[in-house]
Each structure stands twice: as C-alpha cells, then as structure tokens.
Amino acid sequence: MSDIPIENFLVLSAVLFGIGFYGVLARRSAILILVSVELMLAATTINMVAFAAYFDHEAFTGVIFAIFIITVAAAEVGLALGIVLRIFRERRTAYVDDASELKW
Amino acid sequence: MLELLERIPFPQQLDRIVIFTGLVAGALVTPIAIVLLALLIFDEITAAEVVFWLAAAVIILGALGAVLLPNIVHATLSLVIALLGVAGIFLLLGSEFLALVQVLIYGGGVTVLLLFGLMLTNAGDDPKVTDGAQKPFAFLVGILLAGVVGVALVDQDWAKTEVAVAPFTTLGERLFRDFGAPFEIASLVLIVALIGAVAVARRDRDEDDDTVEEGESS
C-alpha cells in the first residue's frame, strides 16, 4: 500500500511516548497529567497498529489490542476525572502536590 | 446553576481560543506542508510519505503543546490536535476502523470529558498552571527515553514488508471469536469504571454535615 519503512512509525511512537512521559513527570495539574497519559497511550497504540499492519497480515492482533487500549483509556479518563473532581471538592485544588498524605 | 453556566468558556472565549489555536497551528504546519509539497512535485518523496510527515508534524507539535503550554485549556485542545493526527497515522497504516474510533472517542468523548473536568475544577478562574520543580529532570528523562528507544528501533533490521489493510470482517471475527472473553471483560471494566466514577464524584447530601461535625469535634 505504501513504501514507508516501519522505522518511521516506530520512532514517531517513541518520540510521542517520550513527550508524554515528560508531561507526566513535569506537570502538577492532575488533569494535565491525564492529558500526558493519553499521549503515552496513543504512542503505544501507534506502535501496536504499526506492527500489526506490517508483520501480522492474517490475524491483526495488534489492531485488536489497540481497540482494547482505547476502551480502557476511556474508562480510565472517566474514573480519574471523578477522583480529581472529588479531590478538588475536598480541598479546592487540582494539583497533585497538594494531595500527598500517602507520600512517605 | 447560573454560576456554573458563567464558568463555561463559551462562546466568546472559546471562539477566541479556537481561532487563535487554528492560526498558530496553521503558521506552524504550513511551512512544513509547503516543503513537503515541493518535494512531492520534484518527485523526491511519494504521496504516502507526504501524508506521514504531515501527520507526524501535527502529532509532535500538538503533543509538545499539550505538555508545554501553561494555559490548561490550550493544552487540552492541543491534545485533541495531536490525537487527530494519530487518526491520520491509523489511516496510513490501513486501519480505517481505528481511525474512525479515534476521531469519535478522542475527538468527541475524551475531549468533552476533559473540558468538563477543567470547567468543574478551577480552570475558569485561573487557567494558568505552574509545573513542578522537577521539570529539568523530567526533560532529561523524556529525551533519554525517546532517544534510547528510538535508537534501538532504528538499529534493528526490520523485514521489508508492505502495509496490509485490515478488513472489517477480519477484525470482527478476531474480536468476537478469538477475543470474546477479553471483550466481555472490557465491557465489564467500562461499566464498573463509569459507575465508580459516578459514585466517587457524587455530591453526598449529608457530606457537609459530616465535615461540620468533624470540625466541631477536633
């Protein structure tokens, strides 16, 4: 279908994962940490779909896994936003630094 | 209720955000698009490669915006741009179904959910957020991770194969025949997560009384 080597897709997903990882570590706002996690999930999805499209022409297992990743990501966003809202209502802040009681 | 409505950044503020974001994104992507088109005209690269590099530029710029912009609403909208670019990559990889799902779920559902989260927390009053003091360290770790994984991937000798389009019938067969049990478990995960989200985020009627009592006793 196309003559793009698979390395392009893999390196793109690696760079995207690195950017998302930076976001998770650097951000303080809980919602922006969620945004960065979404980026990392998108990176893994690209990786799996690339391998399925290039090397798994009968079964496409990577695409199936991508569908599951998207499903679980949607559930994760909903639940995490519920927790963020709860924390915000308890202490009027959405920064993860301010909820550090379990930090040892 | 009125107070809540006033906090929605709509229409003037959101209009301005969308127009501004569009202008910035256009200014960033247009030079790349022009260079790619010139290369295409001079037969240096194929049309598929033009689409790939354009989608890659959109993804990387959108992702950088999502992790670097100080305004929380801008960062979230930047995430949408990056995820739509990912949908383009899926099209290029021959998975129309995933591209559709990506646009529907991320472009629609997750974005609206995140913007609602922003609206219900204090983004309306103070959209600027500060990052943690560990920022340089995080930058180093991100660069190292992407660099190490990228070099490892490039160094590998991949077999020269072509992209195969995933037919809908194959996907459906795989999903419902071979992955039937995981599919059901995923639906269970979804319903449990959504009920749990409602249960966690629900405002209890007697919650205020509890906090008052605790305050009095302490």
Image (cartoon, coloured by chain):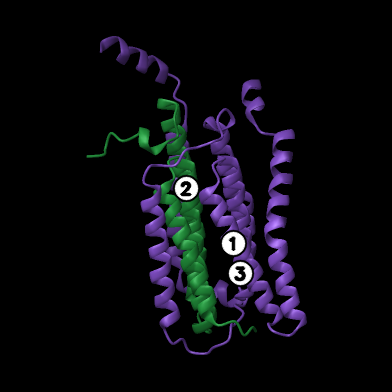
Chain colours: A green, B purple
Above or below: residue B160 compared with residue B135: below
Residue B29 versus residue A66: which sits nearer the camera? B29
Q: Position of residue A29 (x, y in %)?
A: 46, 40
Under tag 2, what secondary structure? helix
Residue bearing mark 1: B59
Give the answer, above or below, for where B163 lies relative to A18.
Answer: below
Q: Specify few, some or many for label 2: CA neighbours under 10 Å numbering under 14, 14-19, or 20 or more.
A: many
User: Decide: marks 1, 2 in contact (CB < 8 A)?
Assistant: no
Chain of the residue displaying label 2? A
For the residues marked 1 and 2, what is the alpha-carbon distance in whole angstroms? 17 Å
Label 3 vs label 1: CA separation? Answer: 9 Å
Work out whether disc 1 and disc 2 sit on a shared chain: no
Circle 2: residue type: Leu
Q: Secondary structure at mark 3?
A: helix
User: Residue A72: image x %, image y %?
Assistant: 46, 56
> Contact, CB < 8 Å: mark 3 with mark 1?
yes
* Residue at horizontal 28 percent and vertical 33 percent from the top: A101
Q: Which residue is mark 3?
A: B89
The single residue placed furthest to the left in the displayed view is: A104
Q: Secondary structure at mark 1?
A: helix
The reply, left or right, for residue B207 in relation to residue B164 is left
Picture layout, residue B158 above or below residue B188? below
Q: To which residue does mark 2 refer?
A: A34
Q: What is the quadrant of residue B59 in the picture?
A: bottom right
Which residue is found at the position 60% from the left and 51% from the top? B78
Q: What amino acid is found at the position of numbered circle 3 in the picture?
A: Ile
**Place of residue B33 in the rendered image (x, y in percent of width and height, measured from the top left):** 72, 68
